[in-house]
Amino acid sequence: MIGCHRSRVKGRTRLQKEVCILKHQDKIPFAFGFKSYYYGPYSSQLADVVDTLVATGLVRQSVKDLDLDMSRYDYELTEKGKRLLGSIEEQFQKSNPKLLSELVNSVRKLEEMTLSEVVSAAKQCSGLESSD
């Protein structure tokens, strides 16, 4: 969810795997620890942060029913979240423009990938497979 270039992520699985890729493959210094889980790498710390962002009104969570047994949780920045992100980007632009540019470029590449490609890439770069 970097910049106003992208303010929505479709699915918890995609969000988890994209952050894992950014950390392990693109060397973005996220502090989240990942472990093997149903669809590859998963971070309970990241899930907690997302829940906090939703609870504070920075991110809106919506649920889309896919079929009788499955739902997808989508995340979108609220206007409040977009303003805060804009401030953070301004600070990064001043303090570490190279990292900001790398992060934006990496997120753009991830947007072009299918969910199965993202899951596969996260497993490969982290070395964490799906748990049974």
Image: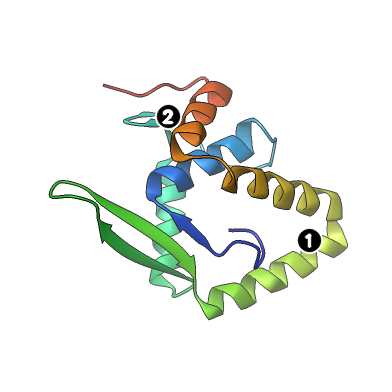
Visible in this render: residue 32?
Answer: no
Residue at screen point 58% across, 36% down: 21
Colouring chosen for the image of the structure: rainbow
State whether residue 55 is above or below residue 28: below
Callout 1, which amino acid? Phe
Q: Which of marks 1 and 2 is nearer the N terminus?
A: 2
Q: In which quarter of the image is the C terminus?
A: top left
Residue at screen point 60% across, 74% down: 82
Residue at screen point 68% across, 41% down: 29
Q: Quadrant of the N terminus?
A: bottom right
Q: Which of 76 and 66 is in front in this view?
A: 66
Visible in this render: residue 85?
Answer: yes
Question: In the figure, is residue 24 to the left or right of 43?
Answer: right
Residue at screen point 66% across, 49% down: 108
Which mark is drawn over residue 92?
1
State whether residue 106 is above or below residue 126: below
Q: Where in the figure is residue 57, as x and y percent of width and height? A: 44, 75
Q: How crowded is mark 2: few (under 14 residues within 10 Å), some or many (20 or more)?
A: some
Question: In the figure, is residue 112 to the left or right of 94?
Answer: left
Locate residue 35: give its quadrant. Answer: top left
Q: Distance between the residues labelled 1 and 2?
A: 29 Å
Give the number of callouts: 2
Q: Residues within 10 Å of mark 1 (few under 14, many from 20)?
A: some
Callout 2, which amino acid? Lys
Q: Where in the figure is residue 117, as x and y percent of width and height? A: 50, 32
Q: Is mark 2 on a helix, strand or loop?
A: strand
Which mark is drawn over residue 46?
none
- Which residue position holds label 2? 35
Q: Where in the figure is residue 23, as x and y percent of width and height? A: 62, 37
Question: In the figure, is residue 88 to the left or right of 21?
Answer: right
Q: Where in the figure is residue 114, as x and y percent of width and height? A: 49, 40
